[in-house]
Amino acid sequence: MYKFLLVFLLVGGFALAARAQSPDLNNKQTKRDSINLRRDSVTSKPFAPKIKHDEKKYHPDSLHSPKKAVIRSMIIPGWGQVYNHRWWKVPLIYTALGLLGDAYVFNEGYYQEFLALSKYREHGTSPAPGSKYYNDYILYQGQQDQTIYDANDAYRRDRDLSIMGFVAFWGIQMVDAYIDAKFQHSYTMDTDFSYKIEPTIMNQQPMFAQSLGSQMIPGLKLTLSF
């Protein structure tokens, strides 16, 4: 009888001891899980969303020289535009220069003609038959001397304007080549823009502060990133 009670007490004590140890086992399991979780968090890479760059970015061309573009346009019209990859401007340049050159040839021819007729009228002579301006002299024989002189001055003025226009347009195409080379190739033109909006406090002017009762009012601040 006593042996049975002793065995029963021993079994009950072991059971109580085993049950008392169960929280420790759970705690150890929890610690083990937390250690594994930390190990996984250390070894694993942090999640980051993929950034898609769909738009093309333009960067400055450090090898492109505005000085070279100007020198090329000064030597040959349109060469600087070709250097800047502005091929479509070359026909426009030569069309304008060609029209000015044609205007010069036209006015120069008539200026020489009326200059010779003016000299004949001044000296009271006439060209020999078959000479260069003989037919023109006969054609304008009925015109007054002042009319011949005015025509001579008008064609000379138009000829000079044609020369000035030709030189001016030559210089304009040089400036155009410089501007294209300077502002198109020397500065970045990235399309990666961003902005940031955040609250701020603005300081009011004295006259507005009196009407509002305070010099500080809330507002929004916009910051652009280029």
Image: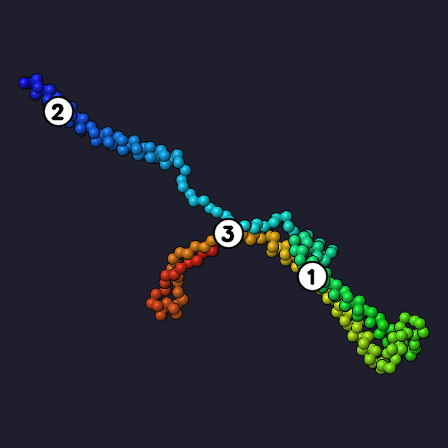
User: In the rendered image, is residue 95 in sight?
Assistant: yes
Q: Secondary structure at mark 1?
A: helix
Residue at horizontal 52%, vertical 50%? 55
Image coords of residue 123 (percent x, y) = 91, 77
Answer with mark 1 or mark 3, whichever residue precedes in sequence: 1
Crowding near pointer 2: few (<14 within 10 Å), some, many (20+)?
A: few
Image coords of residue 103 (percent x, y):
77, 68
Q: Is residue 67 visible?
A: no
* Mark 3 and mark 2: Cα distance apart in space: 76 Å
**179 shown above or below 148:** above
Gap in Å between the C-alphas at discs 2 and 1?
109 Å
Please, what is the three-letter code of the amino acid marked with disc 3?
Answer: Asp
Instruction: Sort mark 1 into few (<14), some (14-19) or many (20+) by Cα contacts within 10 Å.
Output: few
Of the image marks 3 and 2, the number of the one nearer the N terminus: 2
Q: Which residue is mark 1?
A: 92
Q: Amino acid at mark 2?
A: Gly
> Which amino acid type is shown beneath numbered disc 1?
Leu
Mark 3 vs mark 2, foreground winner is 2
Label 3 SS:
loop
Residue for badge 2:
12
Which residue does the image show at 65% across and 51% down from the upper left?
65
Quarter where residue 75 is shown: bottom right
- Judge whether 19 appears above or below 136 on screen: above
Of residues 215 and 129, which is closer to you in this image?
129
Sequence order check: which comes first, mark 2 or mark 1? 2
Tell me whether the residue at label 3 lies in contact with that at label 2, contact meaning CB atoms closer than 8 angstroms.
no
Dots 2 and 1: beta carbons under 8 Å? no
Residue 141 percent coordinates (x, y)? 88, 80
Residue placed under numbered mark 3 in the picture: 192
